[in-house]
Amino acid sequence: MLFCRTCLPYFFCITILLGVSSRLTAEPVVLDLWPDGVPASGQKAEPSEEVRTNKNEILRITNVTQPQMTVYRPDDPNGAAVLVCPGGGYNILAYEHEGTDVCEFLTQHGVTAILLKYRVPSPRECALQDAQRALGLIHHHAEEWGIDPRRIGMLGFSAGGHLTVMTCLHGSERTYSMDESFDVKDPTPSFAIPVYPAYLVERGTEGPLLTDVIVKDSSPPLCLVHAADDPWTASGSFLLAIECKKHGVPCEVHVFAKGGHGFGMKEKGLPVDTWPHRVIEWMDSMGYLTGSGSN
């Protein structure tokens, strides 16, 4: 099935995207990331934004040139917020099982979930710009949305996991002009959860980490999730955890024997299905759900 923005009214397209998971607790809020126009980039002019469901019933969005973030607020917010970044090889966004379904789960635990619809297909720089701007907007709206600015995290899958890592390590390095109405000086998240992150090592190898994966003493705590049988290799997550240890950065790693790549919130009848609960346990142990561990 194909929905095209040129064929449907704009608000109807938004309704379709947000209606993917009608079980979310409150009416979501959609914000354009660049109301004054996206930064100049190497993104090619693409046909109108498309929403497709493939043969595996996976919702995929592509041709995103006007990035947005959708805010899902829980009934009883605990002050924590997480920016969710679907994967898709920087070509598409797996918007449901790595997006809206994740937001639903987080809101059930009192976490304000913000779903990032970043530009695809595009150079990775564009996605980093979108993540930086989204985090700035979350900070600007923190009081309005009941968010503790010290407890704003990020969670991403595959390419979105890579984007999460890059935002943690290079969040304050901008390639666009900062606007104080939307941005903050350092949008680096307080914590991050990369789930089967891609592009940390050369594909087909077990390492080393690529040269832009540079952990610092000041890097935020990580909770890494991977499957050992992932064709993208879990070695990137292991090596990233080792770098965190070298720099005294708190890091927890969950590697499941089976799960492959791209499992997201899809249930496989395997232990990997429990990964979201392991993440919530980690967030709780670190004080992100209560504020007890915030500095």
Image (tube, helix red, strand yellow):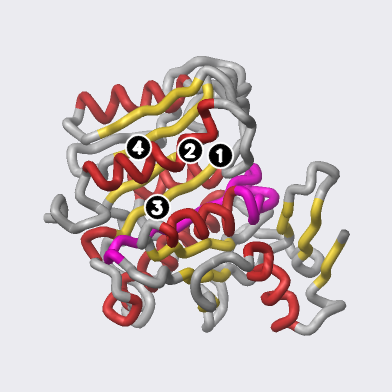
Q: Are marks 2 and 1 in contact (CB under 8 Å)?
A: yes
Q: CA distance from mark 4 to mark 3?
A: 10 Å
Q: What residue is disc 1 on?
A: 158
Image point (21%, 61%), residue name: 150
**Which numbered disc, 4 or 3, marks the residue that appears first in the sequence?**
3
Image point (45%, 23%), residue name: 255
Type of amino acid at the residue the image marks with label 2: Val
Indicate which disc residue 272 carries.
Answer: none
Residue 289 seen in this snapshot: yes
Q: What residue is disc 3 on?
A: 154
Task: Based on the picture, tell me whether residue 96 belongs to the magenta stretch.
Answer: yes
Q: CA distance from mark 2 to mark 1?
A: 7 Å
Q: Nearer the viewer, residue 129 or 188?
A: 188
Kind of element beneath mark 4: strand
Task: Based on the picture, tell me whether residue 46 belongs to the magenta stretch.
Answer: no
Q: What residue is disc 2 on?
A: 195
Type of amino acid at the residue the image marks with label 4: Cys
**Which numbered disc, 2 or 1, marks the residue that appears first in the sequence?**
1
Q: CA distance from mark 1 to mark 3?
A: 13 Å
Residue 31 seen in this snapshot: no
Provide the residue span drawn in magenta.
78-97
Q: Residues within 10 Å of mark 4 (few under 14, many from 20)?
A: many
